Image (cartoon, grey):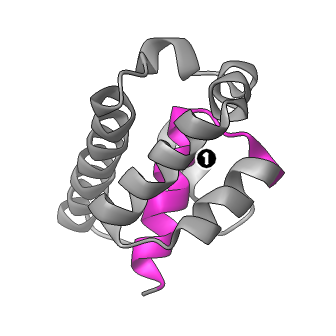
Amino acid sequence: MDYLKNRYEGKELPNKNATDWLDVLTKSHRTYTQVKDAFEDLGIDSKKILNVENASKVLANPMVAESVYKKIEQEFGIPKSYSEDFAKKNGGNLEEWAKFVEEKIENK
């Protein structure tokens, strides 16, 4: 329920049956895992960036930030400029990055 509240924050929850909700949660878990792996593939300990402050610190390093944005572009087809904008406006913990990726994928 916490995930759903965050995912649909400010929006009414869609009317879905149990199978549809399972599909939503399965896709979300897969995206979260892929985003986590994208950070970890770059040597970034995802356990340490679970809060906005630490994510902001990690992304304050231009070389690390550039690598993250390129990795997100390669993995998900999201232009680097979108990731840069997201990071500048939100900082973002790992859950927020996964939500960002999900929303961009859905809007393709």
- 78 vs 65, nearest the viewer: 65
- 2 vs 70, nearest the viewer: 70
Q: List x then y, in percent, for residue 32.
A: 35, 43
| 32 left or right, relative to 85 | left
Q: Which residue is drawn at 51% across and 69% down?
A: 103
Any magenta on residue 42?
no
Crowd class of label 1 (few under 14; some 14 to 19; many from 20; radius 10 Å): few
| 10 left or right, relative to 77 | right
Q: What stretch is highlighted in magenta?
A: 89-107
Q: List x then y, in percent, for residue 107.
A: 48, 84
Q: Residue at x 27, y 68 (%)?
A: 17
Residue 3 seen from this side: yes
Quarter containing the C terminus: bottom left
Any magenta on residue 102?
yes
Q: Mark 1 points at which residue?
A: 6
- 74 vs 33, nearest the viewer: 74
Disc 1, SS: helix
| Residue 8 occupies quadrant | bottom right
* Amino acid identity at mark 1: Asn
Q: Residue at x 68, y 68 (%)?
A: 11
